[in-house]
Image (spheres, rainbow, N blue to C red):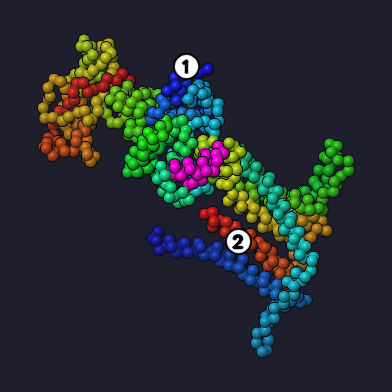
Amino acid sequence: MSINTLERYKKLIITIPFLWISVFIILAVILLSLISLSSLEFGVTPYKLLFQFKDDGLEIKPDFGSYLMIFKDNFYLKAFINSLKLAFIATFFTLIIAYPMAYSISKANENLRIFFLILIITPFWTSLLIRVYGWISILKNNGLLNQFLLMSGIIDEPLHLLNTQFAIIIGIVYTYLPFMVLPIYSSLLKIKPNIIEAAADLGAKPFSIFWQIIFPLSLPGVIMGLFLVFIPSIGEFVVPDLLGGAKIITIGKLLWTEFFMNRDWPMASAITILIIFIVVIPIKLLHRFINNNG
Amino acid sequence: MNEFIKPEVIIKIENIVKQFKTNDYKTVDNISLDITRGESFSLLGPSGCGKTTLMRMIAGFEKPDSGRIFIDGVDMTDIPPYQRPVNMMFQSYALFPHMDIWQNVAFGLKQEKLPKSEIEKRVTETLEMVGMIHFAHRKPWQISGGQQQRIALARSIIKRPKVLLLDEPLGALDRQTSERTQVELTNIQRLLDITFLVVTHDQEEAMSMSDRMAVMKDGKLQQIGTPKDIYEYPNSRFVAKFVGSINIFHGYVMDNSKKHKLTISSDEIEAPMLVNSYESLDQGTEVWVAVRPEEMGIYSEEDDDTHNHAEGVIVDIAFLGNQIIYHVELNSKKIVHVSLPTSARAKNPLLDYGNKVYVSWDKTDGVLLKS
């Protein structure tokens, strides 16, 4: 193959993801922002676009109503704050649980390693919805967990677990655990054994080796994992809807309600745009971190 | 408890055996070895001979199945690496990629919780010693391989270990850098008076860097001695071939009547060979006679009777710069290598392809090998 044809193939290969990103992400975001600035209307498309062609030409009339509403009404703000809080707590616990898992898998022998990795990926073969439903039967008042605790005499009356923030956190941690384990595992695996030996050789005890060598070198995986868990859990819908009950409001549920129940597309779009902003800030921070640390 | 260990022995290895679970042979097979304080000692052998495993057991990264390791008179066999008074310079340098040069070098001292001013002083001193003070705030990936090695060296000597373990210290460097590094390593060794234990598969590296060396094969020590002794008096064909190139003639003892001399008959060479031997061997004993290429000469006629000689034809000439290797095919079809200074060729028309010549060497030069 000549260099020219190779170049042409390269361009062709790059074109596909480029088109994909521009159509499904950039175009979608543009569309969303346009809808978010439109006004609500009853009809087949339940909004009136912000620009209309009239007899005297193009009329642009952006409607900031949805955004104003979000900032004025505590209800929306509370949902945002609650979602962020849940996402923070759940991401933190995911890290606490995932790191030791990733660490022990990376230290296991090769056969065991593959076995553990399969165990971690296996739940993906079942639908998320069904898996979260499973948690209902574990967490409900006469569910598995309460029955076990009652039987073993740890508690006298069933704990109210379902439809609490706690249940949502458990659900998110459970759902997103693999997204934290896998990147941490892969960055732990990349640490060369002789670097750890060098640290021991220079007098570092196991505890120091972990905090001075292993943990810092696994940071890229940790950060990747934090984002893979934090970002989707902000807008998570299934888990808070099934495990959180009606009283706990999150952005994901709000979005769903605005879109499907209230048919308020501009409002749903405005919420989405705000979520994107919330998510872009930490990504920017990550970018800066990577640039500073090479 | 160990008063019988003489103070000049810094590392005492006693009957060390190590077999890895995945192998059906012993990687280190009952090795005992004393390394003297202040010397530069090399473990030389082909890959897989167990030299690296032996070194890793001294560092504490592997545990021997049996046997003991004493460092400066203290039994270190069950002591973890972070409590051993030895440091290692890794073959791949193993610098900490997330730390800059300064932090890399300071790492060992920080583990000892030394005062900050003391650490600062010693890191500066050590970085100056290896000529890398101006690179203190670079990251390891921002400097060249040779520079990385200096940092690895600085990091491993800053704690003033009783023994510095060097794993193939020159292996990854180009020839020029490697020659310079070799001199620098030797200087630093003298300056700091640290015992060096070098592991290498490169005989030149071992010979030029060490006061004594041990040749290893299949987990066993083959020969221990000064580089000169091992080069001139190898004790087996393996050692003879591994340390430099050599011509080996197979034969049998024909006459053992002369004092300290044996006459050997060989099917590879017509005339019987005479070789020095302080041991008298029975007639008919199978032996080998080894002669270094530089001990041989090429002549137009048979030499006097102080020399052994063989008739042959020059079939190949390999130019190596300062010397030329002549490949001479003897009448028995055996090819011997003769090394002569390059300057010899210009003066001597005999030294050309296809010429019929006599290869000869002094009767005191050959070495008798029994295995």
Residue A279 picture location, percent across and down: 66, 61
Residue, x 41% and y 36% (percent of image)? B168
- Residue located farthest toward the front when viewing the structure as drawn: B117
Residue B217 in the image: state x and y as whole percent: 40, 26
Q: Nearer the viewer, residue B123 or B45?
A: B123
Query: What residue sits right under mark 2 in the picture?
Result: A284
Q: Quadrant of residue A109?
A: top right
Task: Say which quarter of the image contains residue A147.
Answer: top right
Instruction: Respond whether the residues carrying marks 1 and 2 are from the same subunit.
Output: no
Tell whether B310 sits left or right of A42: left
> Does the magenta segment cover residue B105?
yes
Mark 1: secondary structure: loop
Q: Quadrant of residue B89?
A: top left
Identify the residue under disc 1: B4
Estimate the x, y position of residue B270 in percent, counting from the top left.
18, 22
Q: Of the residues shown, which amino acid type is indicated by label 2?
A: Lys
